[in-house]
Amino acid sequence: MIMKEDNLADRLLDAVDKKKNPSVVGLDPRLGRIPDHVKKKVREETDDPFEAASKAILEFNKGLIDAVHEIVPAVKPQIAFYEKYGAEGIKVFIETIEYAKKKGLIVIEDVKRNDIGSTAKAYASAHLGEVDLDMFGEKSSSFNGDMVTVNAYLGYDGIEPFVELCKEYGKGIFVLDKTSNPSSSELQDLKTEDSRIIYEVMAELIDEWGEELVGERGYSSVGAVVGATYPEEAKKLRGLMPNNLFLVPGYGSQGGTADDVIPCFNDDGYGAVVNSSRGINYAYQKEPYCQEFGPEEYGKASKKAASDMKDDILASLERGGKVPESW
Amino acid sequence: MIMKEDNLADRLLDAVDKKKNPSVVGLDPRLGRIPDHVKKKVREETDDPFEAASKAILEFNKGLIDAVHEIVPAVKPQIAFYEKYGAEGIKVFIETIEYAKKKGLIVIEDVKRNDIGSTAKAYASAHLGEVDLDMFGEKSSSFNGDMVTVNAYLGYDGIEPFVELCKEYGKGIFVLDKTSNPSSSELQDLKTEDSRIIYEVMAELIDEWGEELVGERGYSSVGAVVGATYPEEAKKLRGLMPNNLFLVPGYGSQGGTADDVIPCFNDDGYGAVVNSSRGINYAYQKEPYCQEFGPEEYGKASKKAASDMKDDILASLERGGKVPESW
């Protein structure tokens, strides 16, 4: 067992306790929805459209992080929305991670990386560890996230390099299990000849892969992604992975409610962090927040939305008798 | 059906015919194995270690591409080895794609991206289409690869955005089916209650997803990844996906032989492109090439290795009676 200060699951749960909040904010910047004043400001700084787009994203993210960092324990930037803008986008993805960590937030990189062993090692060193710089310098961190999401379709030899770095650097992973999207059923819901469902098989693997990374608080730094949109499945998965943290997407814009996410929690009130992206990022564009806040105050709108999400989930936890004792 | 000039499968097979070669070269730059003279040259250009590492990678790749572009129809850069070096690495990944395309090569980005629909759309636009630049400019391409590898654990709604852009821009995808790594069996070999193996289920899905993208030569721009290390499985998969191209990793360093890849081909001699990365990239370090070529001549060593791979596969195709008629 890794020492408490080195175990990511312990760190994440301590942060959840500190904020009394198991909800996290996704950072999914969509250029068309970033307020004009943010974009106009950066347009004066550069003529390169990819650089301008990326700078607008960073500026927008800083506003969001400033607004929510006292409310949530973690943020979850989705790399696809940065990778869109190539190298410039990746640059601000990394700067976003750095900024969020400076504000005391745990950063879950939503990257869903996957590959065979020797290649997965390159991804793992990029996102969680340090990379070799050969004759150009000492080993150095590249993305330096706290956690990443990974896809285990290739089996354990693609996951192991991440697990090894979780041990070495005190990091964590969330392995895709039952995802929140409508067609997740196509593969994940198939039944095997011994009557297990694929997401149950995956759960057993995740439980096994995380055994060595269980921290002092009883949870492993190897967690699972379980969508808020499938509460029945979540209930079964909670039983199969008693010691694994769930990252729960699908709350809000995707249709999952606060009551839907309750089965993802254990009776001790822990075991899950619930993510909302669009619902918080663009609160200034939606009811009721747009009544009170204009685009110039998008941060305030997001802060209110993050706070409302916290209250919403806490109320459901209370109804389900799952509020942590110390809160 | 898409017009011939717009269908990627047609383009790829035309390129295979032109080179009389169904083998492709992976571009998996490992800094520690790049010859010193390449690294020393770039070290004088910058003090930034990430920039230097990335410049060395680009320089090395250009030498490889120059050496093999007359032999192979396509190259397959593996993004993990670039992403390692953050934004600088992504910059040279994109520059590598551009350079290879200028040399007339088809570029298969090995990215294994995957996500829910709205996010997959961002990945698809980044790698195969054009991205929105809002007030900063016209829509513009970002990575501009010809094909990408994708992971379908999340089902079709994460694949559809890629398929849509394949139609719109004449691009292609390879969906992971039976991967070349040892633990691919953990999930991919499970048997369902109706006695189908997961990789067979995936094959049926891939066949269906690719139907609308079958070109004039009878193959779809939606292909499958089938490892050279599993010839028995490949034989079954060839039957289940008669119109889908296979991207076949695992030849060479991973243990797959030329005879092992023959089941991936149809009787017409088409249907597969076989990849080798390490075996070609670092030929200058291995027998017999290291006898003839020093590090300064790594390109010549790689050219010889690529040519030997072509001959090796052609000899096996001949033994298997699968050489295309027109060759």
Image (cartoon, coloured by chain):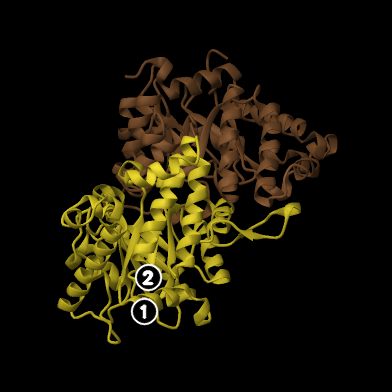
Chain colours: A yellow, B brown
- Residue under numbered circle 2: A73
Could you tell whether A230 is left or right of A281 in the image? left
**On the image, which quarter does residue A248 sit in?**
bottom left
Q: Which amino acid does label 2 sit on?
A: Pro
Give the position of the C terminus of chain B as an image quadrant: top right
On the image, the x and y values in percent for residue A12 come to 41, 73
Dot 2 surroundings within 10 Å: few (below 14), some, or many (20 or more)?
Answer: many
Decide: is B212 above or below B278.
Answer: above
Chain letter, disc 2 residue: A
* Residue in view at x 18 percent, y 72 percent: A316
Give the position of the N terminus of chain B as an image quadrant: top left
Q: Residue A322 carries which label?
A: none
On the image, the x and y values in percent for residue A107 come to 44, 63
Q: Which residue lies furthest to the bottom in this view?
A: A326
* Residue in view at x 60 percent, y 34 percent: B96
Chain letter, disc 1 residue: A
Along the line of sight, which residue is nearer the eye, A36 or A191?
A36
Query: Dot 1 lies on which element?
Result: helix
Q: Distance from label 2 to label 1 (Cα)?
A: 8 Å
On the image, the x and y values in percent for residue A212 come to 49, 75
Could you tell whether B20 is left or right of A214 in the image? right
In the rendered image, residues at marks 2 and 1 fall on the same chain:
yes
Residue A66 visible to the viewer: yes
Q: Residue furthest top?
A: B326
Could you tell whether B174 is left or right of B229 in the image? left
Q: Which amino acid does label 1 sit on?
A: Lys
Q: Residue A18 carries which label?
A: 1
Given contact means CB atoms under 8 Å apart, are the residues at marks 2 and 1 in contact?
yes
Dot 1 surroundings within 10 Å: few (below 14), some, or many (20 or more)?
Answer: some
